[in-house]
Amino acid sequence: METSRTTSRERQTAPDIQRPWEIPAADGTPLYVHVPFCEAKCPYCDFFSVAGEGQDIEGSLEALISEVERRGPRSPRTVFVGGGTPSWLSIDQLERLFGAMQSRTGYRDSAQEVTVECNPESLDEEKARALVELGATRLSIGFQSLRPETLELFGRVHGVDDSFAAFQAARAAGVAAVSVDLIFGAEGQTVGEWREDLTRVLDLKPEHLSCYGLTFEEGTLFTRWLEEGRIERIPEEEELELFRATRELTSTRGYHAYEVSNFCLSGHECHHNLNYWRNGPYVGIGPGAASYVSGTRFGNPRSLEAWRRGAKGGEASLPWSETLNPSHRLAETWWLGLRLAEGLDASAAREHCGVSASEDLCLPEARQLAEEGLLVERGGRWRLTGEGLELADAVSGRLLATGLA
Ligand code: SF4
């Protein structure tokens, strides 16, 4: 599930660069590969993914391989194979995909981290071993909830025991680091239940943990159900309590909250995602995947057929692209960087973007936010305060809006 948020700004539907996929990526650029298939589509999910049954899987695999062969960056520093559910592919299919990635990019000699997203129903020890053989250093497993009724509401096809079995399979296969994904904030969830569930997961000692609040994204079934009154959103104050419990429990167990919703044991930050939050470049392969190369962002079509045509060398359609001017690039660097515990080195970011302090539109807003007790600046680094952390989206949204004005 790619972290490919770009800006809240409307993207240009008429591309300002006609063939951005031909812009060469520098050696070392991180690589994201999007496998769009899942066992079933979850009603809250807005990633580009479809239930695999009845789809032309072989045709899509060939298209992924062609796109890797055409656009894969040489010697990527990190690789992230997400989706969708990459573990839904068979071992043979995974071997063909990773084989093509290796031939084109040589990632096995260059990548410090190779992550593969997995779901419990499609990860057993044999597949985990195969992924390790292919160079995977991290498996990220989508537990999402430890409550059968919530898994059902979320449309998940696995049970609670399957999640624990998948985790143990990853351990038995010798995966270097395992990450667990959880979602809090489902209707009816109490803080007590969440603390219990999170404690059970922390008892497994995963190297990394992502805990996101449930969101209602445009176009999802969940949003429709919400509008129809079939489900309810929990009150903001309750969501805040769940967030606070997450920070407190993870910290008690020695996890570092290196990003608003991401926690790790020492040295186990996800380097691929750190690059997104530091506003670094990346190449995205697969339907709906975003890329950011030489200051231009663009997305692949969110349609299997349109994407396959382009990926296999036919006429490609480009749903959106944007070339950021230096001020906008800086505004996005503020927006993303403040999510990190390390914060943002504003003068280094300005230098990188080629913007002077007097031209930095976010700086006066950051000072204002500091006066409001939401940001703090120390040694040139800007960070969210405890209060700011609880309003992280609003704070970074204000900076982005000012910076893009
Ligand atoms: S398994 Fe993951 S990617 Fe697939 S539909 Fe569910 S949330 Fe989305």
Image: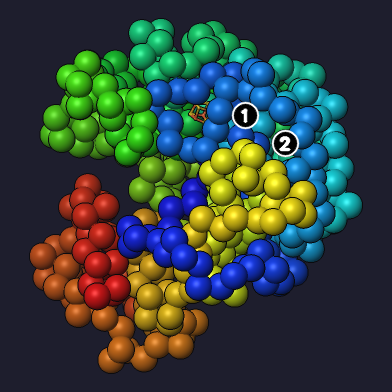
Residue 321 horizontal/vertical position (percent): 50, 64
The amino acid type of the residue labelled 2 equals Ser
Disc marking residue 379: none
Residue that numbered label 2 is attached to: 60
Image quarter (top left, top right, bottom left or bottom right) of the C terminus: bottom left
Q: Report the residue at 67% width, 72% height from top.
A: 23
Colour mapping used in the image:
rainbow
- Closer to us: 100 or 11: 11
Residue lying at the far left of the rendered structure: 372
With respect to residue 15, does 44 lie above or below?
Answer: above
Residue 37 horizontal/vertical position (percent): 62, 29
- Apparent side of residue 342 relative to residue 72 in the rendered image (left or right): left
Q: Quadrant of residue 93?
A: top right
Q: Report the residue at 50% width, 23% height from top.
A: 41
With respect to residue 100, does 214 lie above or below?
Answer: above
Residue that numbered label 1 is attached to: 37
The amino acid type of the residue labelled 1 equals Phe
- Apparent side of residue 241 relative to residue 116 in the rendered image (left or right): left
Whether residue 207 is visible here, answered yes or no, is no
Kindly state the secondary structure of the residue where label 2 is placed.
Answer: helix
With respect to residue 28, does 310 lie above or below?
Answer: above
Whether residue 60 is visible here, answered yes or no, is yes
- Closer to us: 393 or 344: 393
The local crowd at label 1, few if under 14, some if 14 to 19, many if 20 or more residues have their Cα within 10 Å, is many
- Closer to us: 305 or 268: 305
Q: Quadrant of residue 340?
A: bottom left
Are discs 2 and 1 less than 8 Å apart at CB? Answer: yes
Residue 282 horizontal/vertical position (percent): 61, 61
